[in-house]
Amino acid sequence: MYYISENNFSRFLQICDDDYDVFLPVKKGNNRFFTRYTQQIQQPVVGEVRTSDPLKAFFFRAREKVARDFEDGMPAESRKPACIVGVKACDLAGFKVQDSVFINNDYLDPFYKNERENNLIISSDCTCAIDTCFCLALGIKPYPIENFDINLTPLENGYLVEVGSEAGIKIVEIHSQLFTEPNESQKNERDTIREHTKDAVEKNIRNYTIPLKDKFEGIIEKNYESDIWQDEASTCVECGACNAICPTCHCFLLYDQKDEKKMERLRIWDSCMIKDFARVAGGANPREKLWMRLRNRFEKKFDFFPKIADIYACTGCGRCVSACPAKIDIRNVLKRLVHNVYK
C-alpha cells in the first residue's frame, strides 16, 4: 500500500499520458462522464460514484472495424492503449460477464483480448452513493477488490494507493519517487470513507426495499408466465438505452459497408429490447412482443448467467434506472419477482 499526494498524482497522469490515452471522470451537472485527459482539467472526479458512461466502452467499443477488404489479421489501429482513471467496483464487476463471453469461452475475441491486456485501469473507491446505487444487493462492495491495476482511495490531500496486477506493480516501481508509505491516520481515513459509503448504499437498499441476491434463485422460472412482464413493459419505448448503458450487456451486430476503394465489416452494439434483434430469415421472431423481450433481458441476467457462469449479470450500478425514459426500474421489477415467489 502507498500514498500519493495530489501534486504527485498530477505528475503521474502526465507520465501516463506519454504511453496511454488517459481518460478521467469529470462532472457535468449531476452526472459524471469520462473525458480525455488534458492538463487543463482542474477537478477530475476521482471519487464520488460511477460515471454515466460504462467502462465496457473502452473494451467492447460501440463501433469497431473488425475486417477490411480480404486482408488477413485485425485492421490496424493507430490509437494508444487507454488508461482509465476513476473506475468503480460496479463497472469492474462487469468484467466477469464480458470476460465470460469474449475470452473465457469457445471463441476468443481478439479485439476484446487486446484491450484487456493493454489498457491500464486506475480504479477508485466510491466516496458517496446516489439513490440508484444498490451494488451491495448483488454482493458487490462500493470499493474495488479485483480486476484493477491500481486502486485509489481519495483522501483529504491525496490518495491511498493499492496495486492489483503486475502492470500496476511495474508502473508504481518505475515511478516510485512519486509514492510514499502511508501512515496509520491515512489508512484509518480510508476505512472510515469505506464504511460511510457502505452505510449510504445499505440505506438505499432499505429505503427501496430492494431484495438481496440470496432471493434471486428461481425467480425467473417461477414467474415465467407472470403478468409482471406485460405490466412492466407497458411503458417501454424500445429505445435500448438499458442495454447500451449496462456494464454487462454485450450483444452486437455485424454489418458491411463499402465505397469505391474498400470494403469493411463493422461491429456495433445491439439491443435485445429491439424488435428485430431476434428476427430470423423469413420474418419469424421468437420474441415478437415487447414484454417477451423484457422477460428475456431479465432471464439472461438472473437465470442464464447464474447457470452457465455462476454470476448475476447485474452489478447494481443503477444506470438503467437513470437512463430509462419509461421509468422501468430494475429494482422494482426484482422486488415484484421476489415477492411473487416468497409471498
Image (cartoon, rainbow, N blue to C red):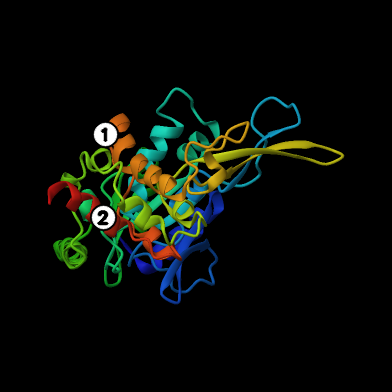
Where does the image place residue 143, in percent across and percent down from the top left?
26, 55
* Outermost residue to the right: 260
Location of residue 159 by image quarter: bottom left
The answer to whether any part of residue 1 appears in the image is no
Where does the image place residue 248, in percent across and percent down from the top left?
40, 45
Amino acid at the residue labelled 1? Asp
Where does the image place residue 166, in percent across and percent down from the top left?
36, 38
Q: How crowded is mark 2: few (under 14 residues within 10 Å), some or many (20 or more)?
A: many
Amino acid at the residue labelled 2? Cys
Q: Earlier in the sequence, mark 2 or mark 1?
A: 2
Residue that mark 2 sits on: 135
* Outermost residue to the top: 106
Q: Is residue 206 left or right of residue 111?
A: left
Residue that mark 1 sits on: 310
- Compute the Cα span from label 2 to label 1: 17 Å
All told, the count of numbered labels is: 2
Front in this rendered view, residue 96 or 6 = 96
Q: Is residue 14 left or right of residue 331?
A: right
What residue lies at 67% left-to-right and 38% top-to-bottom? Answer: 255
Q: Residues within 10 Å of mark 1 (few under 14, many from 20)?
A: few
Front in this rendered view, residue 23 or 70 = 70
Front in this rendered view, residue 315 or 36 = 315
Front in this rendered view, residue 266 or 232 = 232
Is residue 175 positioned above or below 5 on the image? Answer: above
Where does the image place residue 100, in percent across and percent down from the top left?
38, 33
